[in-house]
Image (cartoon, rainbow, N blue to C red):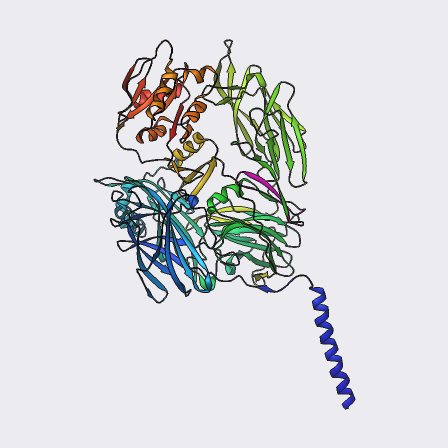
Amino acid sequence: MKKSIIKLTVFCLVFLLAAVIVNKIMNRGHDNLTMEMAPASLPLVTLVMDGREYNQLHGYTADMDVAFQRDTVTVLGEGRDTGFAVDTFGTRVTGISIEVRSADGSRLIEDTEITDYETAGNRINGRLALKDLIEKDTEYSLRILLELEGGRQASYYTRVIWSDSFYVAEKMDFCRDFHERLYDKEAARELTKYLESNSRLEDNSSFHKVNIHSSFRQITWGNLEVREVGQPTMRLVEIAEQTGSVLMDYMVATTEGQNSTYYRVEEYFRIRYTTDRIYLLDYERTMEQVADQERLCSNDKILLGITGPDVPMTESEDGNVVVFVASGQLFSYNMTNNKLTVIFSFFDRENADARTMYDRHAIKILNVDEGGNVQFAVYGYMNRGRHEGEVGVQLYTHNSEQNTIEELLYIPYDKAYTALAVQMEELLYLSREQKLYLVLDDVVYGFNLAERTYAPLMEITQDEELQVSENHKIIVWPEDGDIYRSNELNIQNLGSDTRRSITAPEGEVIRPLGFMDEDIIYGLAYAGDVAEESSGRVFFPMHKICICNSAGVLLKEYSQEGVYVTDCIVEDNQITLNRVRRLESGAYQEIDGDQVMNNMEADSGRNVVTAVDTERYERYMEIQVRRSIDTKSIKVLTPKEIVYEGGRSLVLPERETQPRYYVYGAYGIDETFVSSASAVNLAYQISGVVVDERGNRVWLKGSRASKNQIMAIREASVTEGKDALTVCLDTMLAYEGVARNTEYYLERGETILEILGENLENARILDLTGCGLDAVLYYVNLDIPVLALLEDGSAVLLVGFNESGVGIMNPSTGTIYTMRNSEAVEWFQESGNQFFTYLRAQ
């Protein structure tokens, strides 16, 4: 008996020892431990003005480019001060300091420790005051630095401006009152005077988006019977003497039976303040249902509820796995094993606060296979986890069998989420061979994940130089980097990692125009017809438009004798061509546009996103899946993250910032441009702001006075040696203290842009050709003249304006006079709205 016990004991010990050895051998070189994502740990900072809390700031753990930290603007009081509050959520704060810099971050103005604060539980209340080193009505960057337990630091950014003429309290009070009245239809009747309800502009079919043109019923929540959950937070995003833009974030809920459904809501207000009343210039409310994994599936549908129609969804080739993004969370439903997986989410049910609900990030699905394995990217602000408080691009793989996710690559980024988002929306693609392609700071990079290497493919120097197919699989660009002078196009199929080219016939140049599905649209022009105008703009009349596949095989072409295409717009399956006809004189005359149709129907897949109209919820979004879902036996899974030794970060080399214009709309950066005119045009349409690559404001809508005149500019006349353009250029330069005879520059073929650039060395020269008169008067309001080039080659200067007219210095008449607005608009439009000006160094 004793021998048997000894044998059994020895056998067990040997078995356990063998198991340990085998486990170590099998896992040699990597750590397969898994863990749940760590909860958010950074405090929140909120600014306080006269008891009003606004501008809730989220913490950053990496140094950021302050020129792009434009989410909020804080107005300082008479003593250059403001109140602040810190919600610590249990994290100990050991010190607070501030850093004040110029708007572009290049100049440090102040670095001060803050001691005027008190701590009560998990909240700190205090006050900070800036030194008398700042100027009134000038924007600066403020960084609030918290020292945290464990030696960590967190930075919080806002723009600050010291002014007593912005009426911030009145503007914010208006927004809050408007918001609160919407829950009471009787009280909301008072708001009808601010609305511009128009059924032709808004069909009132969905609660996902309502705006100033929606019906009264739609704006007051229809039959939803919503209740507000918690307190809304308010952000001041832009401020001027008359105008202001405010965002409000909050949660609402609806109840049906025993169940409550929650929604994230964001309200945007753009208002104008006068001593008589406040005007609502724009209003928009966005509502998105928070996905409830317990009630997401029903019959043969995945219920997304009130959300936008453009639901990110990808399916496996056999259609059995559906992967989709809902309310900032990544889900996968596998029909084969009836499993619903919450693959990725910053939202934390156990700690559902403003930190985990913060939505300055996006998720893109990259690959899905039949086994349910998913590769995806998370880009933007990282709410929690290993990169908490950073901005970057995080590439993940989800292993369906092991129910794990693993980080494959992390690329840190030092600018704002919206600056990153516009680039990821332009190009972000992962091939089956594990090669990642993306655009970052005007460079297209290719990453080899297996070898952990990367290389630049091309640098973007012009608008529309890079053309990308809708699925990001095919990219096209001119070989020599000039869309107007190249005779060869590069075509790269990122899916197969193959490159081909299209060469223009002898004597012709080729320009990429866009895509229709994966087919490439390009135009051909005779090299001799391409002309650079005196303004510096390039006229590119295309005698032929071609469509080819990604292998360069011609599929279709369009041409008409004597007719030339100047531009094309691609929408869905239709190409709209803007055209001109060449006259016998050699001039070109605009003619009606034409359309080219694509008759191929896109494959909608086995599982499709559909919209259902209901009486209570109105437009209700669903995913119609190919087979019925057994909701009684469905398994809901949440994967854990694999913990590994070392890091997966790949830091790209710093590059010199290229001149570029960023258009800020209601929610951040809408688009970026190399062309200042394109940027101003978009900002004018969306009532936005244009900012350059250094964070300096280039243009802002709604900040103009009722009248202004540049008194230092006097009448000037043409002479025998000076034509009108020369006089205008000389006058502009003399106004800035530069004495030049620009006739010499014009005679040797220099353009207006080149002349101004050479002689106004510290100024930013702006070509605003194509912008409307109302937009360019922004610069006259700043006491900066605007040169207008006329159809006959002469020129005038815009030097003033009032409510009814425009002040014009006309060398051809030798006078300064006022032209009625309507006449001036028509006059300049006939000449192509060719405007040129500059901004002084800030």
Q: In this view, does 655 lie above or below 804?
A: below
Front residue of this view, candidates 319 and 664? 664
**Which residue is the extreme one toward the left?**
276
Front residue of this view, candidates 476 and 728? 728
Is 670 in the magenta? no
In the image: residue 726, left or right of residue 546: left
- Would you identify the image quadrant in which residue 805 lies? top left
- Would you identify the image quadrant in which residue 193 lies? top left
Q: In this view, does 26 lie above or below 305?
A: below
Q: Is residue 360 above or below residue 631?
A: above
Picture coordinates of residue 597 (x, y %)? 57, 28
Q: What stretch is highlighted in magenta?
A: 432-451
Picture coordinates of residue 323 (x, y %)? 58, 51
Q: Main secondary structure of the magenta part?
A: strand
Q: Is residue 121 above or below residue 83?
A: below
Picture coordinates of residue 222 (x, y %)? 36, 49
The image shows a total of numbered marks equal to: 0
Picture coordinates of residue 93 (x, y %)? 40, 63
In the image: residue 273, left or right of residue 757: left
Q: Which residue is drawn at 61% across and 31% down?
A: 520
Q: Can residue 256 be seen in this view?
A: no
**Which residue is the extreme one toward the bottom?**
1
* Quadrant in which the C terminus is drawn: top left
In the image: residue 589, left or right of residue 646: left
Front residue of this view, candidates 268 and 465? 465
Is 436 in the magenta? yes
